[in-house]
Amino acid sequence: MSKKVMVATVKPFAPVAVDGIRKIVEGAGYELQVLEKYPDQQAFVNAVSDVEALIIRSDKVTREVMDNAPKLKIVVRAGAGYDNVELEAASEKGIVVMNTPGQNSNAVAELVFGLMIYMARRAYTGKAGTELKGKTLGLQAYGNVGRNVARIAHGFGMSVLAYDPFVPADSIRADDVEPVDSVEALYDRCDYVSLHIPAIKPTIKSINFALMSRMKEGAMVVNTARKEVIDEDGLKEMLEKRPDFRYVSDIAPDCKDKLLATYPDRVFFTTKKMGAQTLEANVNAALAAANQILGFFERGNTTFQVNK
Ligand code: 3PG
């Protein structure tokens, strides 16, 4: 019996990306099953009983999914953030979890500018807006997405600062980006702050009123990271107390209806999470995921394992 690899994506990849996965997986003599736009989590749980490898996006690989997949050896999150996989359960069961770092970062970075310009140009209503040139952009975290945002920001003539305690200051400086040594300093000095932090215990709800209220007049926070990092009460307070402040995101907060009704010109949310939703990013991440599965089964390669 050949190994079964499943692509489980509520938000499907572009068809050409799935074709690419198929070529790699079937070319290696494995079987591919594609489960797209499944109606609910139970449908995912029910479908995994004989799979040995999973390729997912933001799909939730819970303990229940793993309990129902006794043959599962590897989960590859085609993308960067893996907060949707229960790592502890995976490690307990000896399941390797990987991501595909960098493969979709340019797509996310380009969306950051799409969102900033949409807001700066007053939602294309024809009202006078503002320009990005000459403004200061703060990157909260300087990983793959942050680096791409910095590269593009320079083309717009923005000054770029970054706060990332895990990246050496010299390597940030090498990109013509000024490292700052506290998150407060980032918010104090920037017109725009773009979030690129993962949703982990120390970051969840960390973007709060105390932090955002430090920003200059006319400030904007751009969130293409995770909705969980925002303290929604703090966001409401900020919008209420600071009529100059704007917030834009491709991952709408739970209180989005209230915010849209109260501050229609100062908040904007895309209908779906779409930072990584480009043909190029889909192909890059999908093919990387398929190749990593092959590398793991054929050569024991665990390079991008995140649950070591
Ligand atoms: C990521 O973590 O890679 C991005 O948030 C993209 O997520 P998606 O694959 O669900 O679009």
Image: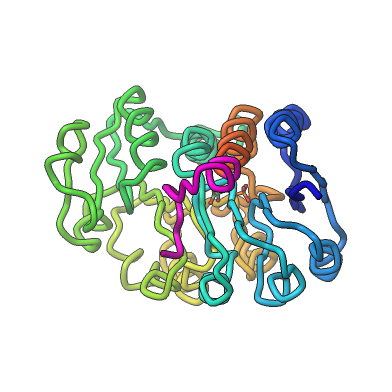
Which residue is at a point 64% across and 38% down the rendered structure image? 277
Quadrant containing the C terminus is bottom left
Which residue is painted at 16% across and 48% down in the image?
168
Which residue is farthest front? 1
Q: Nearer the viewer, residue 75 or 219?
A: 75
Position of residue 270 relative to residue 47, above or below, is above
Instruction: Tell me how the rendering is colored.
Output: rainbow
* Furthest residue toward top: 155
Indicate yes or no whether the magenta region holds residue 299: yes
Q: Quadrant of residue 164?
A: bottom left
Tell me, yes or no, whether the highlighted magenta stretch contains residue 126: no
Instruction: Report the side of 261 relative to 155 (left or right).
Output: right
Which is more toward the observer, 252 or 14? 14
Front one among 108 and 137: 108
Q: Residue at x 58, y 33 (%)?
A: 281
Question: Residue 210: x, y in percent?
Answer: 32, 73
Which residue range is magenta in the image? 293-308
Q: Is residue 111 visible?
A: yes
Along the line of sight, which residue is nearer the eye, 265 or 159? 159
